[in-house]
Image (cartoon, grey):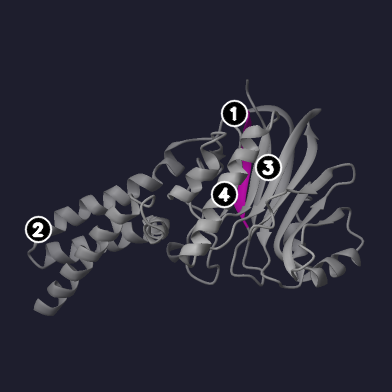
Amino acid sequence: MVVVRRIAMGLAIAVAIATVLGFIGTLFWAFDLIANFRLQLAVVALGVALVLIAARRPGVGAAMVVVALLNAAVIAPLYLRSPQPSDGGDTLSLVSFNIQLSNPQRQLDWILESDPDIVFLFESSRLAEDVLADMDLPYEIFSAIDDDRQYGPTALVRPGMSASKLPYSNEGGGAVRVGTTLDGQPVAVYGIHAPSPGTPMRAEARDRFLERSGRAVEDESIPVVVAGDLNTTPFTHGFELLTAPAELVNSQEGFGYTPTWPAQLPAVLRIPLDHVLHTADLTVLERVLGPRLSSDHLPVRAEIGFAVR
């Protein structure tokens, strides 16, 4: 029992410190990484609390319950908030998926099951685009892969939609803008893949990329949807850099914690890196995660319409 108590106390200290550091991610890039793991911190804190209470350390156990609740409070808005009601008009459906350089032919059954209007494939490749071109799909294929790279974003769009690579997409990530209409009104749909923040330089590149994306959305005069692998979760400073300028709405709100990476792990160990966001004049009618499809990310499918005005 003494050994168990010591291990539990060590975990308690580590989880408490990590919880606090996650709230000050603006000070240091690694602190912001910790903020991605709010669910895991809450689960570990609660487990440690139960062990400490059983080991006759009720005071520390109660403190760990508070730590668990602090982490849970960050996640709670995903359950407590709900999407705005739809105006009942036409909807736009999309799929966002980091395919991890795999063969898209294996994945298209699920991707095309709902007949989406737009499909964003991240970490696509020229080989994947060749495969798609040979499949006689009802889409136009837009490549945003830089000339000096072998992989990047690919967008599948309905004929008549416009697609362009955003000017900052060569800064370590990828960004595509699709122009379309919804109920006769113009709408911009961004597909973005932010750099992964594994080092200080890459974390800075990710934040710069997300900030530029947020400013680009703010500059739009029409409703906007943003979908993609952001390499961050809703609980971080990096996420705010993207969402704050145009007050983007997180489509997870009302649908709960929907983790997408790494796909091979149980849901409680995954984190939500893949997102669909939108401006306040839009709303999400459906949001689902797909199965594991030869990638360490899960695909996200969403149906979007105008909110009641």
Q: Residue furthest left?
A: 56
Q: Position of residue 8 (x, y in %)?
A: 18, 70
Q: Which mark is residue 278?
A: none
- Residue drawn at x 39%, y 50% is 26
Q: Is residue 94 above or below residue 4?
A: above
Q: Which of marks 2 and 4 is nearer the N terminus?
A: 2
Q: Which of marks 3 and 2 is nearer the N terminus?
A: 2
- Residue drawn at x 48%, y 60% is 271
Q: Which residue does the numbered mark 4 point to in the structure image? A: 210
Looking at the image, residue 227 sits to the left or right of residue 136; the answer is left
- Residue drawn at x 29%, y 60% is 18
Q: Which of marks 1 and 3 is nearer the N terminus?
A: 1
Q: Do the residues labelled 2 and 4 touch (CB within 8 Å)?
A: no
**Main SS, magenta residues:** strand
Q: Which mark is residue 303?
A: 3
Is residue 265 among the parts visible in the rendering? yes
Q: Which of marks 1 and 2 is nearer the N terminus?
A: 2
Measure how far apart labels 1 and 2 are at the Cα level. 46 Å
Crowding at label 1, few (<14), some or many (≥20) Cα neighbours within 10 Å? some
Mark 1 or mark 4: which is in front?
A: 4
Q: What residue type is labelled 4?
A: Leu
Measure how far apart labels 1 and 3 are at the Cα level. 13 Å
Measure how far apart labels 3 and 4 are at the Cα level. 23 Å
Q: In what element is the residue under mark 3? A: strand
Q: Position of residue 77 (x, y in %)?
A: 42, 40
Q: Which of marks 3 and 4 is nearer the N terminus?
A: 4
Q: Which of marks 1 and 4 is nearer the N terminus?
A: 1
User: Does the segment drawn in magenta span residue 285?
Assistant: yes
User: Does the segment drawn in magenta span residue 245?
Assistant: no
